[in-house]
Image (cartoon, rainbow, N blue to C red):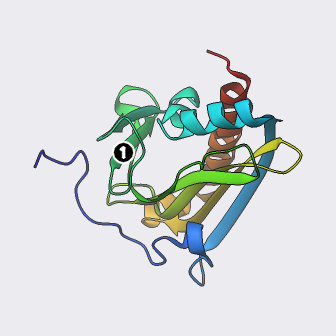
Amino acid sequence: MNARIARGELNYPGIGATEHGPPPEGTECLVTQAYIGEGPAAYRRAVQGMLTWQLQKRSGLRVRAESGVVVPGTRVVSGFGVGPFRLNAPCEVVWVRRPVPGDGPQSAGFGYGTLPGHPVRGEEAFEISIDARGTVTISITAFGGPSNWFYAVGGAVTRRARSHVTSRYIRSAQELAAGVS
């Protein structure tokens, strides 16, 4: 087997809870939902991008993944910042739900959990849905807490950074749904 791009094991309680819930007791859980487009074509484009790491890449994150397609067990290291100020966030995909044939209401998504070296301990999931009217939305669910005292001290900065990255995920999903290159 090839060397993994990130070491260690998933390091938080509630593995898979972003799919099956509820989040572990005592952890902060945030759910953000947003409209991203209309119709089956928009849904398919957004899901295809989400399941090939484009959501993260278009959000400005540097992404290194063991697979070009999101599959359970794949490890990914996302990073933001510049040079020595780059913060790497290693994760492992814990669940994936692929789209089903047909244009009816459905959702697809995936969740990944943190590995040692990530600034938080927890899980984040991305789910894109289409309803009976053809409205396409994204839902981003995250739970967890700081991985150590250093990140705990920077709570306000961490919350602002999380909010900023989430807004970029939403913009990326809207671009994917619209077919923006």
Task: State the SS at label 1.
Answer: strand
Residue at 76% in and 49% down: 104
Name the residue: 45% across, 72% down. 15
Left or right, 98 with respect to 73, comes to right
Describe residue 174's horizontal placement relative to residue 79 as left or right: right
Label 1 sits on what residue type? Val
Question: Is 40 left, or right, of 108 in this rendering?
Answer: right
Q: Residue 144 at what x, y percent from top left?
A: 54, 68
Which is more toward the observer, 52 or 155? 52
Q: Is residue 23 above or below residue 80?
A: below
Any part of residue 74 in sight: yes
Q: Which residue occupies the extreme front position in the image? A: 102
Q: 140 or 61, which lies in front?
A: 140
* Residue at numbered disc 1: 76
In the displayed image of the protein, which residue is found farthest to the right?
133
Residue occupying image coordinates x 56% and y 80%: 24
Identify which residue, 3 or 134, lies in the foreground. Answer: 134
